[in-house]
Image (spheres, helix red, strand yellow):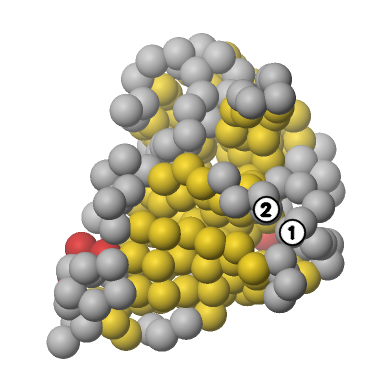
């Protein structure tokens, strides 16, 4: 069974950069699938942040695109999230997940569901 | 943005009862709809995709139906381990918006 585990600081100061890593086991991320980040807060519910393909193609939610970077390290079988200039509104539980996709053509893919999730990590933005 | 609305927010049921949860999309998402179960302290668990296809290892008491804008998740006979929060998610686009969830609690 594919397993994902988030790690990183649980407390980040306002205006700084939030950095999280997702370690994947029981599956090589360089094989296939998209790998994504989702966050959950009481006010906004579950919100997709972005996804990355093992070859490096990225997709970000428009509202966060200017502050988000997702990268992949196939040698460590993990992927990472960086969210810059954080505010209290970025306080949430952050999940990493594997996202299924469907390839329509050699250049067009469509997103599908998330089939495996990590247990989540609470990140609080506070001074 | 496609808005997903779930109802009710909370459902109080007893073990053995039949449960029906609703999810409505603000515009058609075809059959691009998934359901997840979430328990406290855990990440969501995929139950249903394609509106009605059970994910691997999901018991047959869980079933999904609907297409377009109206979807339903049914639990035919509630078990103790089914008390949790259930979310729907559309994946008609990359945003993949989620509903706010329905909590199924013990009556």
Which residue appears at 71% of the width and 75% of the height? A76
Tell me if I can see residue B26 in this picture: yes
Q: Label 2 vs label 1: CA separation?
A: 6 Å
Tell me if I can see residue B18 in this picture: no
- Mark 1 — residue? A29
Tell me which chain the residue with mark 2 is part of: A
Which residue appears at 51% of the width and 12% of the height? B68
Left or right of B50? Residue B88 is left
Which residue appears at 75% of the width and 29% of the height? B53
Q: Between residues B9 and A77, which one lies in front from this camera angle?
A: A77
Indicate the secondary structure of the residue bearing disc 1: loop
Find residue A87 and report its horizontal and vertical position in percent: 18, 69
- Mark 2 — residue? A54
Q: Between residues B107 and B100, which one lies in front from this camera angle?
A: B100
Using the image, tell me which numbered label, if any, was put on residue B48: none
Find residue B19 and report its horizontal and vertical position in percent: 58, 37
Left or right of A114? Residue A69 is left
Tell me which chain the residue with mark 1 is part of: A
Question: Which is nearer the N-term, disc 2 or disc 1?
Answer: 1
Label pair 2/1, CB-CB below 8 angstroms: yes
Q: Tag 1: Cα neighbours inside 10 Å, few (<14), some, or many (≥20)?
A: many
Find residue B41 and report its horizontal and vertical position in percent: 52, 72
Indicate the secondary structure of the residue bearing disc 2: loop
Q: Nearer the viewer, mark 2 or mark 1?
A: 2
Relative to B66, residue A11 above or below? below
Find residue A25 and report its horizontal and vertical position in percent: 77, 70
Picture quarter with the N terminus of chain B: top left
Q: Between residues B40 and A118, which one lies in front from this camera angle?
A: A118
In the rendered image, which quarter is residue A101 located in?
top right
């Amino acid at each position: 069974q594919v397993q994902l585990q988030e790690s990183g600081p649980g407390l980040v100061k306002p205006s700084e950069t939030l950095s999280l890593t997702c370690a994947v086991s029981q599956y090589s991320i360089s094989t296939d699938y998209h790998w994504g980040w989702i966050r959950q807060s009481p006010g906004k519910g579950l919100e997709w942040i972005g996804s990355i393909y093992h070859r490096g193609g990225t997709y970000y939610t428009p509202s966060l695109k200017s502050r988000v970077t997702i990268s992949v390290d196939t040698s460590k079988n993990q992927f990472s999230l960086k969210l810059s200039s954080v505010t209290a509104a970025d306080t949430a539980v952050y999940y990493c997940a594997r996202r299924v996709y469907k390839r329509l053509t050699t250049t067009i893919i469509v997103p599908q569901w998330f089939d495996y999730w990590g247990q989540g990590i609470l990140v609080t933005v506070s001074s | 943005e496609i808005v997903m609305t779930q109802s009710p927010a909370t459902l109080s049921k007893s073990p053995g009862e039949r449960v029906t949860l609703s999810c409505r999309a603000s515009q058609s998402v075809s059959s691009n709809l998934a359901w997840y179960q979430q328990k406290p302290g855990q990440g969501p668990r995929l139950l249903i995709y394609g509106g009605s296809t059970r994910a691997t290892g999901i018991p047959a008491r869980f079933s999904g139906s609907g297409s377009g804008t109206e979807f339903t998740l049914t639990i035919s006979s509630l078990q103790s381990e089914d008390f949790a929060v259930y979310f729907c998610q559309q994946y008609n686009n990359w945003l993949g918006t989620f509903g706010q969830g329905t909590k199924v609690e013990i009556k």
